[in-house]
């Protein structure tokens, strides 16, 4: 029995119309554009975030300027190692008021990182010049550098620590 395509039957007509419609959609795809730029995911592209992501401004701090960023108010937590200021807010469990390394929050943590100690005497009092770290042994310097590498891979560098308020972004 030979198979013939008979347009007379309703099923074949419907199929034929559907194929015509599909071919038409392929040859002339819809180019309708949204009237406004979508900023939410609605089963399609999100072209813009809902809001601008928070930006971090690179700043120059003195130890006194850094101290308020100790997380005690629930805000940002910063610490410095060898003059590099890291935003460690994401590590609040470590550096928050109840964190194991809370002493370092808002402070120059260089000596503690070098000597692997979170004792309070590792911290330079805020009214004294920055710790020059000149007495550190080579292995302690290496240990500190290791921490700088760890922090650089994990946190955002958001500033540098200087002695002189003249060079700070007050
Ligand atoms: C009592 C001994 C200690 C224990 C049991 C301990 C335990 C830990 C643990 C479990 C972590 C988390 C590791 C991770 O999830 O990546 C960590 C991270 C860390 N530890 Fe210790 N630690 C000790 C001593 C110290 C000391 C003396 C220092 C002083 C510098 C120190 C500094 C740090 C730092 C800076 C981190 C990285 C936190 C971060 O990634 O932000 N730890 N420690």
Image (cartoon, rainbow, N blue to C red):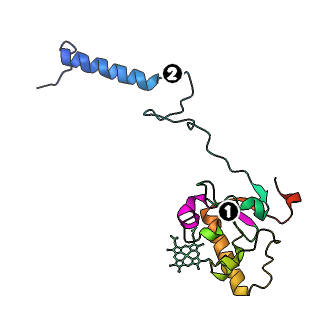
- Residue 27 at x, y percent in the picture: 45, 24
Q: Determine which of the numbered discs, if any, sits on residue 86 in the image.
A: 1
State the residue at coordinates (58%, 54%).
74
- In the rendered view, does 129 fall on the left or right side of 137? right
Residue that appears at 78% across and 59% down: 61
Q: Is residue 71 left or right of residue 59?
A: left
Please identify the residue farthest to the right as the structure is shown: 166
Residue span colored magenta: 84-98
- Between 123 and 139, the one lying in front of the other is 123
In the displayed structure, would residue 95 be above or below residue 42? below
Residue 62 rendering spot, x and y as whole percentages: 79, 62
Q: Is residue 96 magenta?
A: yes
Count neighbours of disc 1 (C-alpha within 10 A) and say few if under 14, some if 14 to 19, many if 20 or more. Answer: many
Residue 43, compared with residue 28, is above or below; it is below
29 or 80, which lies in front? 80
Question: Which of pointers 2 and 1 lies earlier in the amino acid sequence?
Answer: 2
* Residue labelled with disc 2: 32
Element class at badge 1? strand
Q: Secondary structure at mark 2?
A: loop
The image quadrant of residue 158 is bottom right
- Measured as percent of width and height from the top left, residue 82 is found at 74, 71
- Is residue 78 in the magenta section? no
The answer as to whether callout 1 falls within 8 Å of ligand 1 is no
Q: Is residue 160 left or right of residue 2?
A: right
Vertical placement of residue 165 versus 2, above or below:
below
């Amino acid at each position: 029995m030979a198979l013939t395509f008979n347009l007379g039957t309703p099923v074949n007509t419907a199929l034929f119309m559907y194929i015509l419609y599909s071919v038409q959609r392929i040859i002339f795809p819809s180019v309708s554009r949204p009237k406004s730029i979508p900023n939410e995911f609605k089963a399609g592209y999100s072209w813009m975030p809902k809001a601008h992501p928070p930006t971090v401004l690179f700043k120059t701090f003195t130890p006194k300027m850094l101290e308020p960023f100790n997380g005690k108010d629930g805000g940002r937590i910063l610490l410095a190692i060898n003059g590099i200021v890291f935003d460690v807010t994401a590590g609040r469990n470590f550096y928050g008021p109840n964190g194991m390394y809370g002493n370092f929050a808002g402070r120059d943590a260089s000596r503690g990182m070098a000597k692997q100690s979170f004792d309070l005497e590792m911290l330079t009092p805020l009214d004294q010049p920055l710790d020059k770290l000149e007495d550190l042994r080579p292995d302690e310097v290496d240990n500190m550098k290791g921490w700088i590498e760890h922090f650089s891979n994990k946190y955002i560098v958001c500033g540098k620590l200087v002695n002189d308020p003249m060079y700070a972004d007050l």
